[in-house]
């Protein structure tokens, strides 16, 4: 049975049993800072289990793409050398939100595995939490599993919790006996043993408790079921192969590596097979992560991508002298592109980013390996210290995992604790500290209706008041207070759009809004109370019209910009961040190369064409899936209600999921102009642009500047660039002539300056104060002096109210004399600052005081 058929059977089985098929969420978690990547099927249902979110269904089935290569769930070191560990995998799961519980979950799992998948019942072993008599009895009495094949295990194996507090509950796992040839050989080997014989296929989590801070477990008002089964593991069991890498999920990649290297996988030893496995797994994970909008960097999830690619590059060397990884991308796209279309759109970007990352790493790899080999050759304790591992990481870009791989192959261990200490010291030195966040006040019983789509002026009663993070019934005049109205036109910063400005009027007293925020589903407005306030009082809220209007222009222009980027640069473009400000818009996006002037011009022209067409901007609500089916753009970092999303559409050009405020028609934007394009990192770029009045202001300022330059150069606008280039060439020629004259002048004066040399404590010293020389000239003079007579040369140029200086010491004298103490003297006595090397100091400061020469000479006599 092929993996595609397994997918289909899984979905069909559970949809026939009343489950709603829910697509996989992005690998980039939406609004969940606790996760680098989605690592379980339940991630996207977290708020449903917590009771913070309601769905239109109570049963769900999904196959969630997951990555475990960093943080708490990190399988990276094991990948390639076990039969089951992967960095990227697909988790099959069925879920119940207050619907069925243990009995049905166990029946569903057993029937699917034995009847749909045809796995032998006598090879399946259920495990339950040691105190869960209910699950134990269900397996025995309902399913009919003999008691001797049901194992009770402790909390470390069979109890799940979301965190230190919150929803938790016992688990029941289903293990498959692969046979004694896969075991540890011990007579005591049984489910719960760490060997590979009893292979976990499915984990059924029964959420029935709410763990309290004191460790007690209170029953949940609504129980739930969360199950997880690795598609790769199930495919291994169904296809009866020895490891996940022998399933049809990986064999196309393995075959491609064979073609590229001429090495036959099945004929190799464990180490070479391991290299094949690493490449096969890592190309899937890096491709999937990049397709979802992440890219290699030095922090967070970007660093995980970097680690994966660099580890693959290291293992690639064991198979070929040529890089292999990017050549495998088309195979991943071919195999998974029909399931995850984002792979097809991102193929070129994935290849470009992988090639860039490997090229960047290749030189560091050679140098880093040389350094690591030196560490090992000088070490008799067979240990790489934490400091050495950190140097490799910090200087040569060697992730710790790579150092461990190379070291362990040579029989060395790495001091992981020491490395972590070095990392912590670096964080302290760089000033990165943990930010204390005050526990938020939740208003679960209060909701504010947002009226800002329709109006900028709203009257509403006060529902709640908050002072110093405490809910109160009234607030005195002069207190800083959060007002929670029943209705509000104020937009709170969200989705990149900054919050509104405005005023609140109470009992004929008006106060400026100082902050806006949300309290769960309620809008909070911070003001300094202009009079005594009480719950129930009527307030009048008024949004600053000009501020909002400019934000709306920039927000709609951002949608037009994204559509134009996709149209001109390709569907691989993904938004990676944005800021909608009243003065400008900022748009970050994934793209693997620099934009050409022609592309920038096309993008600007396309956006302005849409503005000039004055297209009516429409909004409507639909379900998340219906929106995606129609090609509506969703931003991977946002969280969407699957039952109701808001679509903002410029018909025929742009359609995005968005909760922000927008213009009535594109013509209201007026004008669009890109002001800056920069590279944030490899594969990630930023556009800054202006619209409306700010674009007009920029146009006017630019026009005035061009007009003045045309008058100055006495040319027409289209001739201005040529005139400027000609002027630059003339300036360069004049500078070259001046430099040649300076050089002649130095040659003429050199004998005189050499003659002024005096000997202090056996050292030839010249002290000069000049005018009209730059630092380059002074440096050239110092070199000429050193050529004729090695010594110490202190050369100053006084110009206006400033001094520049060069201090030159011949290299043959650097061992005996130090410029550091001279630098300290210059700073203390003359307030001159600078830096340099053991043989050259340069810098500047205020004019030298009268008598400076004698002061410096006296100091040199005492200290040289």
Image (cartoon, rainbow, N blue to C red):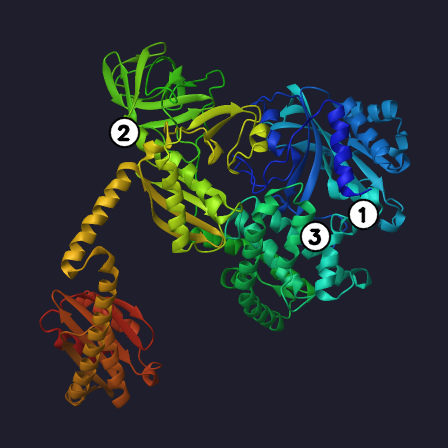
Q: Disc number at residue 196?
A: 1
User: Which mark is in front, 2 or 1?
Assistant: 2
Whether residue 275 is visible, yes or no, is yes
Q: Percent x, y for residue 592? A: 50, 54
- Alpha-carbon span between mark 3 and mark 2: 58 Å
> Which residue of the protein is positioned furthest toward the top in this rendering?
536
Q: Percent x, y for residue 701? A: 21, 47
Residue designated by label 2: 546
Q: For mark 1, does the 10 Å Cα neighbourhood hold few (<14), some (14 to 19), or many (20 or more) residues?
A: many
User: Which mark is in front, 3 or 2?
Assistant: 2
Residue designated by label 3: 78
Describe residue 232's horizontal placement relative to residue 32 as left or right. right
Nearer to me, 774 or 529:
774
Describe residue 533's horizontal placement relative to residue 418 as left or right. left
Counting residues from the start of the chain, the first of labels 1 and 3 encountered is 3
Q: Please say if the residues under marks 1 and 3 sit with CB atoms less than 8 Å apart.
A: no
Q: Is residue 818 above or below residue 136?
A: below
Q: Please say if the residues under marks 2 and 1 sit with CB atoms less than 8 Å apart.
A: no
Counting residues from the start of the chain, the first of labels 3 and 2 encountered is 3
Q: Is residue 76 above or below residue 728?
A: above
Q: Is residue 133 above or below residue 399?
A: above
Q: Quadrant of the N terminus?
A: top right
Q: Percent x, y for residue 105? A: 76, 26
- Alpha-carbon span between mark 1 and mark 3: 13 Å
Q: Percent x, y for residue 425? A: 47, 54
Q: Quadrant of residue 235?
A: top right
Q: Quadrant of residue 849?
A: bottom left
Secondary-structure class at tag 3:
helix
Nearer to me, 535 or 24:
24
Describe residue 827's horizontal placement relative to residue 389 as left or right. left
């Amino acid at each position: 049975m092929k993996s595609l058929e397994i997918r289909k059977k899984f979905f069909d089985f559970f949809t026939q049993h009343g489950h709603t098929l829910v697509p996989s969420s992005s690998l980039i978690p939406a609004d969940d800072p606790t996760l680098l990547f989605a690592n379980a099927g339940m991630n996207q249902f977290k708020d449903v289990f917590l009771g913070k979110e309601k769905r239109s269904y109570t049963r769900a089935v999904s196959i969630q793409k997951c990555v475990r290569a960093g943080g708490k769930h990190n399988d990276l070191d094991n990948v390639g050398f076990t039969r089951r560990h992967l960095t990227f995998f697909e988790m099959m799961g069925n879920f119940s939100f207050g619907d069925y519980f243990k009995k049905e979950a166990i029946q569903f799992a057993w029937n699917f595995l034995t009847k749909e998948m045809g796995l032998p019942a006598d090879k399946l072993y259920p495990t339950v939490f040691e105190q869960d008599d209910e699950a134990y009895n269900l397996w025995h009495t309902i399913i009919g599993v003999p008691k001797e094949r049901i194992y009770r295990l402790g909390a470390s194996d069979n109890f799940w919790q979301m965190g230190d507090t919150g929803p938790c509950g016992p688990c029941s796992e289903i293990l498959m006996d692969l046979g004694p040839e896969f075991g540890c050989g011990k007579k005591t080997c049984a489910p719960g043993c760490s060997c590979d014989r009893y292979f976990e296929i499915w984990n059924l989590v029964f959420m029935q408790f709410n763990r309290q801070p004191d460790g007690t477990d209170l029953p949940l008002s609504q129980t739930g079921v969360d199950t997880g089964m690795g598609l790769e593991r199930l495919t291994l069991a169904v296809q009866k192969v020895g490891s996940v890498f022998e399933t049809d999920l990986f064999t196309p990649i393995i075959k491609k590596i064979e073609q590229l290297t001429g090495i036959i996988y099945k004929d190799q030893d464990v180490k070479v097979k391991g290299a094949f496995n690493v490449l096969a797994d890592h190309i899937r994970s890096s491709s999937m992560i990049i397709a979802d909008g992440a890219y290699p960097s030095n922090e967070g999830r970007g660093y995980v991508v970097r680690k994966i690619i660099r580890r693959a590059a290291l293992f690639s060397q064991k198979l070929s002298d040529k890089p292999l990884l990017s050549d495998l991308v088309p195979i991943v796209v071919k195999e998974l592109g029909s399931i995850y279309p984002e792979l097809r759109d991102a193929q070129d970007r994935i290849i470009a980013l992988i090639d860039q990352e490997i090229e960047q790493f290749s030189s560091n790899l050679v140098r880093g390996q040389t350094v690591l080999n030196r560490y090992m050759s000088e070490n008799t304790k067979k240990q790489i210290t934490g400091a050495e591992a950190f140097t490799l990481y910090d200087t040569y870009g060697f992730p710790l995992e790579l150092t461990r791989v190379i070291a362990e192959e040579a029989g060395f261990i790495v001091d992981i604790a020491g490395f972590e200490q070095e990392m912590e010291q670096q964080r302290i030195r760089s000033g990165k500290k943990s930010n204390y966040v005050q526990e938020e006040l939740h208003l679960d019983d209060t909701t504010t209706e947002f009226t800002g789509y329709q109006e900028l002026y709203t009257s509403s009663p006060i529902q709640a008041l908050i002072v110093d993070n405490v809910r109160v019934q009234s607030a005195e005049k002069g207190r800083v207070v959060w007002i929670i109205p029943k209705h509000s036109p104020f937009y709170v910063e969200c989705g990149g759009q900054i919050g509104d400005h405005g005023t609140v009027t109470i009992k004929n007293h008006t106060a400026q809004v100082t902050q806006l925020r949300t309290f769960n589903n309620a809008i909070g407005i911070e003001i300094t109370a202009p009079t005594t306030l009480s719950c129930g009082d009527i307030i009048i809220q008024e949004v600053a019209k000009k501020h909002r209007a400019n934000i709306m222009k920039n927000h709609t222009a951002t949608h037009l910009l994204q559509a134009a980027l996709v149209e001109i640069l390709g569907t691989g473009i993904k938004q990676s961040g944005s800021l909608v400000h009243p003065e400008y818009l900022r748009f970050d996006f994934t793209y693997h190369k620099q934009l050409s002037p022609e592309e920038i011009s096309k993008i600007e022209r396309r956006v302005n064409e849409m503005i000039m067409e004055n297209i009516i901007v429409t909004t409507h609500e639909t379900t998340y899936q219906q929106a995606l089916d129609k090609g509506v753009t969703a931003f991977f970092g946002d969280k969407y209600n699957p039952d109701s999303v808001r679509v903002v559409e410029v018909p025929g050009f742009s359609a995005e999921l968005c909760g922000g405020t927008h213009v009535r028609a594109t013509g209201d934007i007026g004008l669009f102009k890109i002001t800056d394009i920069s590279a944030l990192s490899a594969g990630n770029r930023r556009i800054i642009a202006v619209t409306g009045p700010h674009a007009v202001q920029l146009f006017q300022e630019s026009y005035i500047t061009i007009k003045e330059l045309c008058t100055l150069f006495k040319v027409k606008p289209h001739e201005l660039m040529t005139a400027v280039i000609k002027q630059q060439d003339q300036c360069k020629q004049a500078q070259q002539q001046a430099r040649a004259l300076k050089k002649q002048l130095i040659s003429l004066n050199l004998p005189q300056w050499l003659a002024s040399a005096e000997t202090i404590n056996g050292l030839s010293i010249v002290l000069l104060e000049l005018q009209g020389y730059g630092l380059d000239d002074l440096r050239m003079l110092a070199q000429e002096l050193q050529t004729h007579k090695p010594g110490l040369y202190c050369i100053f140029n006084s110009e206006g109210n400033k001094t520049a200086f060069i201090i030159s010491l011949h290299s043959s004298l650097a061992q005996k004399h130090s410029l550091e103490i001279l630098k300290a003297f210059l700073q203390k006595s003359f307030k001159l600052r600078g830096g340099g090397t053991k043989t050259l100091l340069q810098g500047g400061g205020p004019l030298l005081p009268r008598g400076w020469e004698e002061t410096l000479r006296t100091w040199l006599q005492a200290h040289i």
